[in-house]
Image: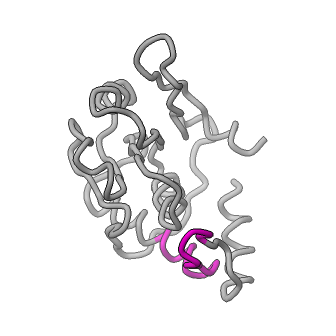
Amino acid sequence: MLHAEVVGRAERWSSAVALVDAATGRSLRYGDLVDGVRRFAGALRARGAQPGDVLGIVAFNALEFPIAMHGALAAGLTVAPASPLLTARELSAFLRQAGARYAVADAESLEKVTGVEEVFALEALPMGSPLDFAGGDPEALAVLFSTSGTTGLPRAPRTPTRARWR
């Protein structure tokens, strides 16, 4: 799977800058990115998350977003990113349709997230023992994107893992 290739490269470039937040100037090195992904994946598994569970992510762009997304994918979860501009009613409907068990939300969106077992603050993601990346099932559901909802409430089209790598 692609995770192994990406992680291998990131480990070779561990001290190089991987991401920069243009608004704040904060940066994240490749080594810290991979470590965060592995440790968030470990925290999810320690909380009982299983492959196939769904993690909703409701957040504006932030350095922690790829840690949350790739950490969930590394743990075998399906990710359901949603716009923080959705109303509480729209967000609740999307997370329910996606079958979200967990959610990650930025500070502006935390109050709108309901109906999930546990909500994590994006700015303070829980970290556990590092989880090694597993190959996973290429047919497993990877991402449930939120549609715009122009003809009703937002919907969640399904994207298998293999589609991410094309």
Identify the residue at image location x=27%, y=51%: 110
Quick check: 9 left or right of 99?
right
Please state, as top left, top right, bottom left or bottom right, where the C terminus lies in the image.
top right
Q: Position of residue 54 (x, y in %)?
A: 39, 40
In the rendered image, residue 103, in percent from the top left (x then y), is placed at: 33, 48
Q: Residue furthest right?
A: 166
Is residue 146 magenta-colored? no
* Residue 1 horizontal side relative to residue 80, left or right: right
* Residue segment shown in magenta: 21-38
Please tell me how many numbered marks the rendered image carries: 0
In the depicted structure, whether residue 51 falls above or below residue 61 = above
Residue extending furthest bottom? 15
Residue at 57% across, 69% down: 23
| Closer to us: 130 or 95 | 95
The one of 126 and 151 positioned closer to us in this rendering: 151
Q: Is residue 34 magenta?
A: yes
Give the position of the N terminus as an image quadrant.
bottom right
In the figure, residue 32 lies in which quadrant? bottom right
Outermost residue toward the front? Answer: 23
Identify whether 12 is placed above or below 77: below
Name the residue at 51% across, 52% down: 73
State the residue in front, 77 or 115: 115
Front residue of this view, candidates 80 and 59: 59
* Place of residue 33 in the rendered image (x, y in percent of width and height, measured from the top left): 56, 73
The quarter of the displayed image where residue 125 is located: bottom left
Name the image colouring.
one colour
Please tell me in which quadrant of the rendered image residue 52 appears: top left
Residue in the picture at 63% in, 73% down = 20
